[in-house]
Image: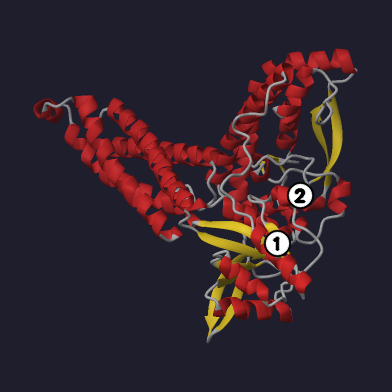
Amino acid sequence: MKARQLHNWILIADLLWAGIALAVTAVLRYGLHWEKAERLGARNLIPFLVATWFVWGLLSYVMQLDGFRRGWRFSAIVTHLSLAVAFLMILLLAGAYLSQRYVSRLALTYFGVLLFFGFLKLRWIALGWLQRRYRRGDVSRIVILGSGPVASELALKLGRHPEMLCKVVGFLSSEVDTVDVDSCVCHGTFVTGISTLGVTELLHEQRVNELILALPRPAMPEVLNLVARCQKQGISVSLVPQPYELYMSKPNLIDLDGLPLLQLRDASTSDMFYQWKRVVDVSGSSLLTLLAIPILLPIIIALKLTRGQAFRWEKRCGWQGREFSMLRLNVDRDPQCDTPVERILWQLSLTEVPQLWNVLRGDMSLVGPRPESPDRARRYSDWQRQRLSVRPGMTGLAQVHGLREQHSSEEKARFDLQYLLHPSPLADLSLVVQTLWTLVTRLVDYSRLAKSHEGHASPEAGSEPPGDQVALETLHNAHRAQSGAN
């Protein structure tokens, strides 16, 4: 099944579940006595089903609610579904009020809860079906030709999309550099000497279905020869267009009489969005400041007594590269030698809460690329400097994926520019909710780690090495033997 077909089937299942949820709602609210249900207005629920089908189909298209197109992440799926269902229920309530059609508020509550948990269950069923196909080996086996950061990112993103039904089983490279294996979803074997005639036969023996080119110069003679031999062996060939850094633009593939032309369109955003974003920043940061004061006040007093000052100012690069002073609590980053309280403050990013003041001042936004020091910003490539085209944020897409200040600017830029390609109010709200999920996860992980250190326990049960990943060891060994024979 193709990925697009899976998306369509999930939408159809959602619409069918909406009808079932409405029937269950009627039973829960009105019972099995139709006369009583008629008297209490159960018939008025039917127009709400039609409205639900229309609105949910629209939301699924705009927000990509199938759960796979943005990569399978449970926190993101829960967040997107909860926001979409909440928005749907608000529209239904508004429609009931404007149409002056009576409907039980309790019935709508039942309906919303059933919708959310049913939609979530449907995606778990789809994931389970995909996992069963992986276990049966009913997937495409892929080898990536390349050994740079693009090859690593490609392997990582393929691992986040189970609906693609493919598995990276190894890498080929003619260069001496190596891929950052820790950032990959699998540990394939790196094989050199792609010009060797035996490589194609060995790929065929290993049942490789597809070769993906992720090279900065894919038109090298030995690469073209390898592609031709793979196609003769029935191995599909795909290509990551280079330079990959151009993908801050939205690509559109045009077939010009057999000549592929990749059109790069500007990913511009309307001024109205940024005006709305500023209104949300001011109102949201004001509310969060009022909520944070009772929590931060004792921490501020304790830091003042123990460290002499509670806050520190740090230079950062913001919008259009302008420098500003960012406020944070006076706690070191990753304070391994400090008190447990300070470690928890850093782990939960509570040290960054004072940056609400920067948001109120207009230096920062609630959501956006995290600001970095002027020293780092001066070393940005032209591609990375695109992060400076918007106000920096307290949280962003890179942060909900677990990246923090110790990670490289290159890693964070790929997520930040992905966010800039598809900015929307719902995306910002979703990232705020996912940030809370990320912080809770960090706290749970920190508690488990602390307990394991105290009890000298074994590693966590969930931290198993990647299983069911078939490396190309046979390919590597055979290639070495062949090279030695030659």
Residue ID at (21%, 40%): 46
- Report whether 113 appears left or right of 269: left
Q: Is residue 282 above or below residue 309?
A: below
Determine contact: label 2, label 1, CB under 8 Å: no
Q: Position of residue 453 (x, y in %)?
A: 74, 21
Q: Is residue 480 visible?
A: yes
- Report whether 349 appears left or right of 373: left
- Report whether 371 appears left or right of 268: right
Q: Amino acid at mark 1?
A: Asn
For residue 112, the mark is none
Mark 2 / mark 1, whichever is N-terminal: 2
Residue ID at (79%, 62%): 382
* Observer-nearest of 62 and 231: 231
Q: Position of residue 364 (x, y in %)?
A: 73, 41
Q: Is residue 248 above or below residue 275?
A: below
Q: Which residue is mark 1?
A: 477
Circle 2 sits in a helix, a strand or a loop, which is it?
A: helix
Q: Is residue 370 above or below residue 350?
A: below
Q: Residues within 10 Å of mark 1 (few under 14, many from 20)?
A: few
Q: Position of residue 123 (x, y in %)?
A: 42, 43
Colour mode of the rendering: secondary structure
Circle 1 sits in a helix, a strand or a loop, which is it?
A: helix
Quarter of image, res 169: bottom right
Numbered disc total: 2
Q: Amino acid at mark 2?
A: Trp
* Observer-nearest of 13 and 163: 163
Q: Position of residue 212 (x, y in %)?
A: 62, 67
Residue ID at (62%, 73%): 200
Q: Is residue 102 visible?
A: no
Q: Which residue is mark 2?
A: 319
For the residues labelled 2 and 1, the Cα–Cα distance comes to 52 Å
2 or 1: mark nearer the eye: 1
